[in-house]
Amino acid sequence: MSDSLAKELAKLLRENPLKEFPLMQAQKMTIKPSTIIKPKKGKNEWKLAALLPDTQIGYRVYEDGTVIEFHSEKAIDIALQILNYAHQQFGVDTVVNLGDTLDLPAQSRHHQEIAFQNSTNLAIQRGYEYLAAQRATVPDAEIVFLEGNHDCRIYKYLAENAPAVVNMRQAGSADSWPVNSLPHLLRMDELNITYASGYPAGEYWLNENLRCIHGDRVNSSGSTAMKYINSNHHVSVIYGHIHRIEMLYHTNHTSTGPGRNAAFSPGCLCRVDGSVPSVKGGITPNEKPVKYWENWQQGVGFAWYKDTGEFTLLSVPILDDWAVFMGQEFRTKLD
Ligand SMILES: [Fe+2]
Ligand SMILES: [Fe+2]
């Protein structure tokens, strides 16, 4: 309320408190834009985390040598462009791969297709290239690889079918990763990547309030974010697994003031057209995936966070072959 209007009302009330206020046309005034408090140079103790959700890197390999990918090369290309731009503009401190980076269908308990059988080494090579591209883009950042339910399929497959070989290591390297473990296969030590194992308990904390996990909850017809919010009002969660974009902020009434927490899923970087083996997907008799648009959304996320516990979250949807991040359009040149 303008000062002049407040004074006018006070005057009317003094004269006669019971008098009805007249309805008046708004007074014309000169409106000025808000004054911007000039931001200080630099990030002011804010750190930046890039959040890369489910790529499901995997292939169907056919007799004639052709392949069909599960991961979206276009979405991955756009995600890495945005990561590069964010690093050049602001400096990326942390990259969190939110799990299901590999799909590993040949080691699954689900239905097996012949086209899965020669796919694992291709996926390991592509997975390594994806991680190496991250390291080349952000040479000094902490890069975290959260283990998803798909990533631990090789371990589970061996533990159930050939437990005697699960822990085999190269001679002379007792402290190294087992040869069939994902950190070894993807050369994570050489890339200086932190492997957050132990799905579904595996986690990475950006600060005392903000936890990154792969996730083990899905509410297909509603909000998975609400499940996380309600499971622990004291912790905010960044999660993958559902392949959908969700963001929810929540406020609790507490004796000391508003208690806030948030839940955020940035989406996925896999194909969303039925190519990823799923509950709703299907194949033809020659094992070609049938076109089916999953209710999944491609995207990446960012978290600005401080060591003192504050954070704010940003969703960047990848819509078909483009995305807009901080006013900048990103497109892929891939067909
Ligand atoms: Fe998952
Ligand atoms: Fe997934």
Image: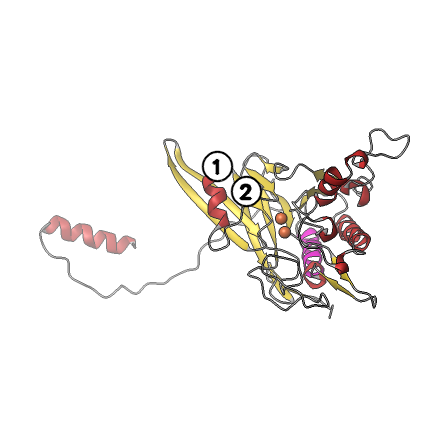
The answer to which quarter of the image holds residue 329 is: bottom right
Residue 332, compared with residue 172, is above or below; it is below
Q: Main secondary structure of the magenta part?
A: helix
Q: Amino acid at mark 2?
A: Val
**The residue carrying mark 1 has its beta carbon less than 8 Å from ligand 1:** no
The residue positioned 55% from the left and 55% from the top of the image is 245
In the foreground, 146 or 142: 146
Q: Please tell me whether residue 238 belongs to the stretch shown in magenta.
A: no
Q: How is the image coloured?
A: secondary structure
The picture places residue 30, in percent across and down from the top left corner, at 36, 63
Q: CB of mark 2 within 8 Å of CB of mark 1?
A: yes
Q: Which mark is residue 237?
A: 2
Magenta residues?
Answer: 77-89
Q: Image check: 108 left or right of 247?
A: right
Quadrant of image for the N terminus? bottom left
Q: Which residue is mark 1?
A: 232
For this orientation, the residue located farthest to the bottom is 335
The residue positioned 48% from the left and 49% from the top of the image is 248
Quadrant of image for the C terminus? bottom right
Quick check: can you spot residue 86? Answer: yes
Q: Secondary structure at mark 2?
A: strand
